[in-house]
Image (cartoon, coloured by chain):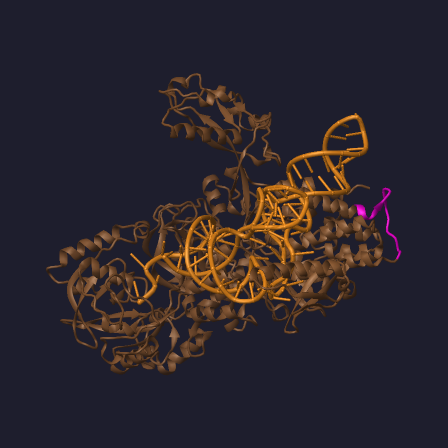
Amino acid sequence: MEYNFRKIEADWQKYWAENQTFKAENKSDKPKFYVLDMFPYPSGAGLHVGHPLGYIASDIYARYKRHKGFNVMHPQGYDSFGLPAEQYAIQTGQHPAITTETNIATYRKQLDKIGFSFDWSREVRTSDPNYYKWTQWIFIQLFESYYCKDADQARPISELIAIFNAEGNTKINAACDDNIESFTAEDWKNYSEEVKQHILLKYRLTFLSETEVNWCPALGTVLANDEIVNGVSERGGHQVIRKKMKQWSMRITAYAQRLLDGLDKIDWPQPLKDSQTYWIGRSEGAMVTFNVDGFEEDKIDVFTTRPDTIFGVSFMTLAPEHELVSKITSAEQKDKVEAYIKATAKRSELDRMADVKTISGVFTGAYALHPFTGNKIPIWIGDYVLASYGTGAVMAVPCGDERDYAFAKHFGLKIPNIFENVDISETAYTEKEGVNIANSDFLNGLSYKKAMKRIIFEIEQKGFGFGKINYRLRDAVFSRQRYWGEPFPVYYKNGLPQMIEAKFLPIVLPEVEKYLPTEDGKPPLGNATVWAWDTKTNTVVANKLINNKTVFPLELNTMPGWAGSSSYFNRYMDANNPDEFVSKEAVNYWQDVDLYIGGSEHATGHLLYSRFWQKFLFDRGILPVDEYAKKLINQGMITGTSAFAYRWEYNNHEDEKTKKIIFVSKPRMDKIIKERSTIEKEGKNVKIDPTDLLREAELTKASENNQWSNFTPIHVDVSLVNASDELDIEGFKKWRPEFKDAEFVLEDGKYIVGREVEKMSKSKYNVVNPDAICEEYGADSLRLFEMFLGPLEQSKPWKTSGISGVYSFLKKLWKLYIVNGEFSVSDEKPTKEELKTLHKTIKKVEEDIDNFSFNTSVSTFMIAVNELTALKCNKRAILEPLAIIIEPYAPHIAEELWKNLGHTTSISKVDFPEFNAAYLVESSKEYPISFNGKMRFKIKLPMDMSKEEIEKAVMSHEKTQAQLQGRTPKKIIVVPGKIVNIVG
RNA sequence: GCCUCGAUGGCGGAAUUGGUAGACGCGCUGGAUUCAAAAUCCAGUUCUUUCGGGAGUGUGGGUUCGAUUCCCACUCGAGGUACCA
């Protein structure tokens, strides 16, 4: 009876599917536990061994929790809208839905092979109309809501309308656009419907606005800030420019404070919390208004976090795009200012970022008036001031801010010092604490804290401004000029957006002939011929009917990638409900995610937006909690170990014709490079005939007029390399026919490749396919090995050679039950030693899983099986609980053993065994030690140590210490098993 | 620049509140079995040594009877972020 994992795994996967073993009910006497994975985007390349890492961890936890008596939900689905399928469609004309379908089938096959305990009855796909119906529905809810700052929550827009009717907008404290004019109830009632809608749009949580966006001409779409890396698009690395466009936006800024506060309630990794905190970027300070000399009407508002330094202001700087610039610029400075504005507009984002150090700016010729001193302050423009943050203007305090300092130094502006006993001749003083304010009138001698309080009081008192909290977080642009995304449930009547009633959803993505933007620059949906809304029939109809009075054009943009993923975890709770996003019963039962595992790359994208939607849906009474994931773990990336062959490149052109393709083994190459550098140090030029490489003497031969050649590393498919880094030369020649005549310079008859850790990718030929691993070693080995590789949260390189360890562990486990080729267990009572092994293992594994230290628990299993093998233990009382605790890691073999033990139900329904502390106490003894009765501490020593040995160990330790400290060693008395006394 | 995390044998990595550093696995060495190989099993494997021992967890300090663990400074590496007033 061999350990035939192929048969075992196939049988059990079939059994699980047929019996729906992992289907979770929305009702149970057991406590609930929700384990969530970040659902994958089904890419054409399929899974590589890095992808399932987080899924394996969450699956182990889910299976463990089932054994622990929880009703576990562990769903899976697909984030199936996205750019790759669309770009493939643009290239090939194939509908993205087809590509997606195929890819999902591949993914499902691969996932099934690994033996996950997913509840597939809850599967969601973001591109499925039955799913995106609810994405559209949430969008409508956002449109029908505004954010009431007094209640600090989202409220129905109808309430806002009622307030407008009753008292206008003067008392409203709501999140809204900044260009709102106040009106009375009377005004409101007299406004036309159109005007009313325009006003309401400024309050809605999703709104249409002319926004400056990151436009990527190459992709023909708008990108979010987090889709841009170093000024170019994350995907493809194309140029990105700023452009004004009419776009849907999400008023996430209304939630800035709550998104910040919520972080304290959830157990998420600190680095991730930090990056969200930074992204939200709360800063406390004040808005201060400066009058402009000679311009009664125009004032400059600035936001500052250091109003306490206001007496240190010696100039002001405006962003070049600031609206007042053209107005206040003096005649003499006009040319210079215009030239500067032109120059900055030209500079791409990339230039501006790469070139932070350069200081540039121009004086406008205008002066502001200091609100307290009345002094004239020169107004400059400079591109270090960003139009998009704060008010696009700063009051410059060169003594307290490095950029202001650098600017002042560069242009020879005054740098007044307002800090007590601080030298600012070299650099600005940016610390807040530890210094008192000076030369600042009523602030003199005050600390930072006191000065802040006083100045904000004075500013507010005198009407120069007010204390304010500012956020870096921007409203999120929600429109994409793409085809393969959720269509908006929106049509336009007289240019005003209208929501389609929820009962007519979903609005299904129309067919188009071309997936590219139209020739006149409209999004791809502009190519659709059946894309208009008939308000009479409430159906999508042909565009040509738009002349009818009841037919209107539909929105041409689609939603961004994060739309479908922002609340999918709630839909899992009630995935097949056609009438509600999620029923009250389902959501009240499941509440929230207990464990969420996924990558940290979504820190400021998905993981922020989903928290925002959660809070919104909570406000509107749809969800019972406002944070959806209690605990989150970021699994590390599994990197690939690329292999390289080193090609000898001749520099000598004369030999071009007779040039041979030669690959040199890695250690040999290293040697050659080393020798070369030695020779070059001696100032000689050397040429070597590569065919002579084997002859050591040739290497040292110096030849005056020739040059060394270089080695070019060439990626080798990792499957052609064995565990000892030896290349399969014949396989390599077949794989790359252009090298079929290549010569290889070997080492003891072997070609040794070079290794380097890189991200797994097709082009680097370092991708390891989990299917191949399952085929060769089995899914249980793959699962164990991925966990054994290292701590879950760390990134680590894949090395297939290590898998033999876990594979032989499984074989050993199997062999424990097989005596003379027969499955055999004894009902004999286990010995104390055997029980000790078992209970030690149970305890350790339990602790490890609770701490998510899956790697060490695998070691614990190995130790247990080694010990039991040594004891030749095949007793049921030991093996049965052992199979149960191993199940989360190696479910197939565990189920098979379980069956062979005579059980008829699946092992996954069995309770995790209790450990018996009695057996553990004997495994180690604690020796408390006291010094002169004063200090006590414990030393853990192996139980088999004799009194003499302990005495010797402690004494030798004491001797060393005494010697080091120059005192006489103290006498030590050991009381066996109890106390070690060290007496004076 | 800033933020975060990390540094332990040839390699991946263990080490409850500070208490035998290097568990477990890979690799390597030797042996058993075999006609031979694979597989399996056993032993060894931080370095150094005059075989008593000595040194040792990135570097330098500190606290402690005792530090991989705590504190300070530094070096290197990985990831994130970027003129945020």
Vertical side of A30 occupied by A600: above or below: above
**What count of labels does the image hold?**
0
| Residue A823 on the magenta segment | yes
| Residue A930 on the magenta segment | no
Asked whether residue A922 appears in the rendered view, the answer is yes
The N terminus of chain A: image quadrant: top right
> Nearest the camera: A556 or A590?
A590
Residue A381, given in percent of the width and then of the height, sits at 21, 61
Vertical side of A86 occupied by A724: above or below: above
Residue A657, given in percent of the width and then of the height, sits at 42, 17
The C terminus of chain A: image quadrant: bottom right
> Nearest the camera: B32 or A266?
B32
* Quarter of the image where one finds residue A838: bottom right
Task: List the single residue furthest toward the left.
Answer: A332
> What is the display colour for chain A?
brown
Residue A388, given in percent of the width and then of the height, sits at 32, 62
> Nearest the camera: A757 or A932?
A932
Q: Which chain is orange?
A: B
* Quarter of the image where one finds residue A212: bottom left
Which residue is located at x 58 percent, y 30 percent? A727
Residue A326, given in percent of the width and then of the height, sits at 18, 62
Vertical side of A805 occupied by B21: above or below: below
Per the rendered image, the range of residues in magenta is A815-828
* Quarter of the image where one finds residue A957: bottom right
Asked whether residue A192 appears in the rendered view, the answer is no
